[in-house]
Amino acid sequence: MTCRSPHPAARSARILAWAADDPPLQRRFRRQLASATGWDTARCERAITEYLRFCAVAAQLGGRAVPSEDVDKVCHLHLTWTRDYWEDFCPNRMGFPFHHQPARGLPGEREVLRLGYAETLHTYQALLGTPDPAWWPAWSAFRPRGRRGRVGLAAASGLLASLTAQAFPGPLDWRGPDFLALYFPTLGGCLLFALLWRLWHRLKRSPTRGIPPGETPLWQLAFLRGGPRGVVDAATARLYEDGFLEWDATRKQLVRRGDGMPQDALLRALLPNLTGSPARLVLAERAGVMQELRDRLIRQGWWHSEDEARRIARISALPLWLLAGFGTTKIAIGLYRDAPVTLLVLGVIVTLMAALVLHFSRPQATRAGRERLAAEKARHALALRAPRKGQLALAVALAGTGVLAGTAIAGYHGLRHPSNAGDASTSDGADGCGGAGCGGCGGD
């Protein structure tokens, strides 16, 4: 019996009607599913619905489909209902024997499953609408099973401060509690000013210039999201997809594959520094092409120029620098007068830390740049959850290296984010069922 029915719409309708055609059977099935999973009635109903939609998609793909983990639980349960599954569901609804094949731990198998899952989601969208992320999460969410001189200085400075206080009477000559009652509200006002100043520049809409027509170039998207580091990550994914790089799990580094060179000028410039010691990745991030990308984004109005970013940061920090100096002067006066200054010292430390953060934290992408990036993320939302072959570099450019989980280059994510290395650890074969459900299904 062939996998392709001459009436695919009728076949899908038969599959989706399974849950309603035999109410007593469905009630028993739901009770067993709830007992096995701990789900409530509403979640069991939705799980069965998503399972039947998966089966409709699998029929459209000739049986070559990969379920999500939750959908796979329903698959397993239905397989135990052997009479209904093999004598009614498969021949009368699917139109062919729909087998469930666990992962076998073969080299390269997980990459095949990843691409199969991507094809499943894209077919689902074409057939039934956008798949719900709650039931069809990003592939990267799957994990393979089985893993996982004080006095002298004070006197000198205090004497100077005391003379200053006498020359300029006012708060510097106040008692400690009165001064603190002024200092801490002033600190809050300075922080509020810094927040509003930065927020105004963040929301300010500047005219964009020289925006190229059509789709935004990949490397510009990568720079908008992650700066030079984001470009290096996206370039690595593209070079891996194009067969120029592979991941050496033993040495935990990228290695060249073949002697060819990519046609893209940026890839040719970065490739020499992507292989060998991971420390060379810093050289790739400092390549001249990064400044060219930054300049192009600045001309388009998508990135703050260096002078503008420095001005925004310095003005936001300036009131805090002045307040810290004011508080430090009062501390010196307090030490000279042998008055307690502990609370004021803590306040000045907080002020200095906030001033340092604001001074060196400079805005990067403009509102126009962030809006363009958000639009591209929305446009490619499905590709971010399940990138097809050829879409991996785009997914990394828009979402980061977390999407590499489950690929043959997943170790690169652990290299770039050591604290999250466990999220991306994987192998070509997993024990038991693998990351996405039971490793996919196949029809005979």
Image: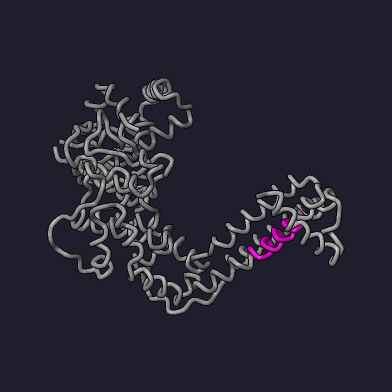
- Horizontally, is 74 left or right of 370 in the view? left
Above/below status of 77 relative to 398? above
Residue 373 point in image, percent of width and height: 44, 62
Seen at 53% across and 64% down, the residue is: 363
Question: Which quadrant does the N terminus fall into?
Answer: top left
Of 63 and 279, nearer the camera is 279
Predominant secondary structure, magenta span: helix
Residue 42 point in image, percent of width and height: 48, 31
Of 254 and 87, nearer the camera is 254
Seen at 27% across and 64% down, the residue is: 270
Above/below status of 25 relative to 62? above
Seen at 70% across and 61% down, the residue is: 325
Based on the picture, tell me whether residue 380 belongs to the magenta stretch: no
Quarter of the image holding residue 107? top left
- Horizontally, is 77 left or right of 316 in the view? left
- Horizontally, is 147 left or right of 202 in the view? left
Q: Which residues are magenta?
A: 317-330
Seen at 84% across and 66% down, the residue is: 168
